[in-house]
Image (spheres, helix red, strand yellow):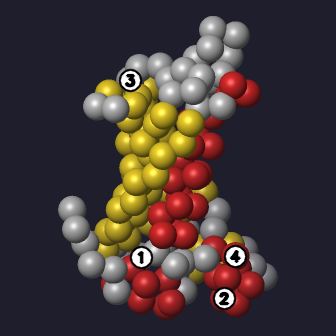
Amino acid sequence: MLQIKNTHQLYVRYAETDKMGVVYNANYFIYFETGRNEIMRANNMSLVDYESNENVYFPLIDSYAKFHISAHYDDLLDVETILSYENGIVFRFDYILRRGEDIICTGYTRHCFINQISMKPVKPPRRFIDALEGIKMTF
């Protein structure tokens, strides 16, 4: 199994909270997306490049979130993201959102690549696999 990990921070914005000042549940999936973008960026993997040069898209297959405790406006959150791939079409991102030592939310998303013309699933581009294989794991 190939795995890479990244952690980045974000502040909860006022627009992401409900009337009670609590992060609205759907916004956690936006935080998950920032985790995906940041792990790719940190490892020099560009989905825009894959879409343009490999003629693939990167759809979401399914997602899950478990809400442990609430996050609030102006909380500083650590978004830990782990990308896992095991020789197939589907790969997975796992997420842990923390405020300090407190776990706020955990979850995952699963994705695949699809051909832009046929819209059928395809194996990840070779450059994607090569990038994963070239990253040394430290966890």
Judging by the rendered image, the residue that carries numbered circle 1 is: 88
Marks 2 and 4, how far apart at CA: 10 Å
Marks 2 and 1, how far apart at CA: 17 Å
Tag 3 secondary structure: loop
Tag 1 secondary structure: loop
| Amino acid type, residue under disc 3 in the picture | His
| Amino acid type, residue under disc 2 in the picture | Glu
Marks 3 and 2, how far apart at CA: 39 Å
Residue 68 is tagged as 3
- Name the residue rendered at 59%, 51% in the picture: 33
**Marks 3 and 2 in Cβ contact (< 8 Å):** no
* Sequence-earlier tag: 2 or 4: 4
Give the foreground label among 4 and 1: 4
**Marks 4 and 1 in Cβ contact (< 8 Å):** no
* Sequence-earlier tag: 3 or 2: 2
| Residue 10 rendering spot, x and y as whole percentages | 54, 42
| Residue 88 rendering spot, x and y as whole percentages | 41, 76
* Sequence-earlier tag: 3 or 4: 4
Front position in the image: 90 or 6: 6
Judging by the rendered image, the residue that carries numbered circle 2 is: 54
* Sequence-earlier tag: 4 or 1: 4
- Name the residue rendered at 66%, 22% in the picture: 17
| Residue 127 rendering spot, x and y as whole percentages | 51, 90
Res. 118 visible in picture = no
Marks 3 and 1, how far apart at CA: 32 Å
* Sequence-earlier tag: 2 or 1: 2
Number of residues whose C-alpha sits closer than 10 Å to that of mark 4, classed few (under 14), some (14–19) or many (20 or more): few
Q: Quadrant of residue 49?
A: bottom right
* Sequence-earlier tag: 3 or 1: 3
Tag 4 secondary structure: helix
